[in-house]
Amino acid sequence: MRRKDKEIIDVNEKLKIIGKNKVCRLALSDNHQPYIVPLNYGYSFEKEILTFYFHSANEGKKLEIMKKNNRACVEIDCDDVLIEGEKPCNYNYAFKSIIAVGRIIMLNTIDEKKEGLTHLMKHQTGKSEQYHFDEKMMERIIVYKMVAEEFTGKRKEVLQ
């Protein structure tokens, strides 16, 4: 990261940003053509490994791209506040953001899919309960995860 003064180093602070938000942007590459899509997500952080969980219909552009190239990037941002300046070029924005890069892994078994969807539901609802998923529905949807090889945090704060 070029601006070390804006880097978020504390893992717990980065996890707070991930936990606070419900939508991320998943970036993929299709023959050097960028493709980005907003998605709801779930996540886990176990043994120092960050994993994002997603679901989708069993067809579409996103899945076609992931089959050809499983490299991906997740972006999450929050707490954006306009910082006014005296001149137009002095305006700025306060923010917090996370960037994670890794590989997409398809979850194939019913148990894997249930685990992924449970992470997603717990994060989206804020409820740690036992979720029950219809077996027929599980056969019709795609559940996948991105295991982060690295993730960084960045912030610009409003100076008081």
Image: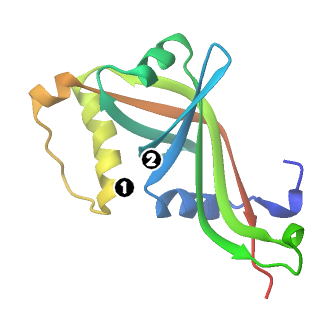
The residues bearing labels 2 and 1 have C-alpha atoms spaced at a distance of 7 Å
Q: Which mark is residue 123?
A: 1
Residue ID at (32%, 31%): 56
In the rendered structure, the answer to whether residue 38 lies left or right of residue 156 reads: left
Name the N-terminal-most of marks 2 and 1: 2
Badge 1 element: helix
Q: Report if residue 46 is visible in the image.
A: no
Residue 138 location, x and y as percent? 18, 28
Question: What's under tag 2, amino acid-wise?
Answer: Tyr
Residue ID at (29%, 40%): 117
Residue 130 location, x and y as percent? 18, 52
Q: Which residue is mark 2?
A: 43
Question: What's under tag 1, amino acid-wise?
Answer: His
In the rendered structure, the answer to whether residue 14 lies left or right of residue 119 reads: right
Q: Nearer the viewer, residue 48 or 16?
A: 16
Residue ID at (50%, 40%): 51
